[in-house]
Image (cartoon, helix red, strand yellow):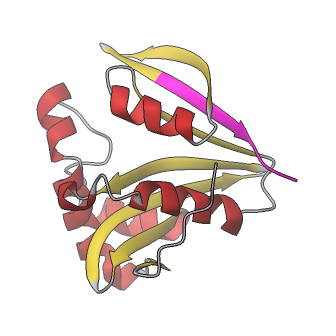
């Protein structure tokens, strides 16, 4: 994977005061998943839940210049860095922002031995995206009527 340079993209860690922005952003980005599946773990959560998310996870807001373009949520557990979610607003997709953000997270969490994530089986664009970043499928599991695909990538050390 070739490192991408994007001068106009920046990320900042969300704080409790950002909880309304985080909730609004997640509800907008993950609305289609909620519509398609009738459920989405990142959609429709309470303000309190969002504040707890910011407190317990590493939540980063992604900006294209001054405009809010997306979000990534990280959970660190020992030497594992789990990407709980990454979402880019529709109007910013296809501009390699997601690739850039994933590279930045892998660099930022350089102490991790492994990166993990999951997505729904029918999200073929997501699966292709993660594979192109070097993630390998480690398994699948049914979650209710939905099939999840699990990915893993060993860190570069």
Residue 16 appears left or right of 101: left
Please give the name of the residue rendered at 30% of the width and 52% of the height, measured from the top-left corner.
94
Up-down: is 15 above or below 117? Answer: below
Total count of labels: 0
Up-down: is 120 above or below 28? Answer: above
Q: Which residue is at the far front?
A: 2
Please give the name of the residue rendered at 78% of the width and 54% of the height, measured from the top-left corner.
112
Up-down: is 141 above or below 32? Answer: above
> Which percent across, then down, holds residue 59?
47, 67
| Residue 156 part of the magenta-drawn span | yes
As rendered, which of 134 and 86 lies closer to the eye? Answer: 134
Region of the chain picked out in magenta, as a range: 149-157
Q: Where, by quadrant of the figure, is residue 103 drawn?
A: bottom right
Q: Where, by quadrant of the figure, is residue 74 drawn?
A: bottom right
| Residue 56 part of the magenta-drawn span | no
> Which percent across, then down, holds residue 63?
35, 76
């Amino acid at each position: 994977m070739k490192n991408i340079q994007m001068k106009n993209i920046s990320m900042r860690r969300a704080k409790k005061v950002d909880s309304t922005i985080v909730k609004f952003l997640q509800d907008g980005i993950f609305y289609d998943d909620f519509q398609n599946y009738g459920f989405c773990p990142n959609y429709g959560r309470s303000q309190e839940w969002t504040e707890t998310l910011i407190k317990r996870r590493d939540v980063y807001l992604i900006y294209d210049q001054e405009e809010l373009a997306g979000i990534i949520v990280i959970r660190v557990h020992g030497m594992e860095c789990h990407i709980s979610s990454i979402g880019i607003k529709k109007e910013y997709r296809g501009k390699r922002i997601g690739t850039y953000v994933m590279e930045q997270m892998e660099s930022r969490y350089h102490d991790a031995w492994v990166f993990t994530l999951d997505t729904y089986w029918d999200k073929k664009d997501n699966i292709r995206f993660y594979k192109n970043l070097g993630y390998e499928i480690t398994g699948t599991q049914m979650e209710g009527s939905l099939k999840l695909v699990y990915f893993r990538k060993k860190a570069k050390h």
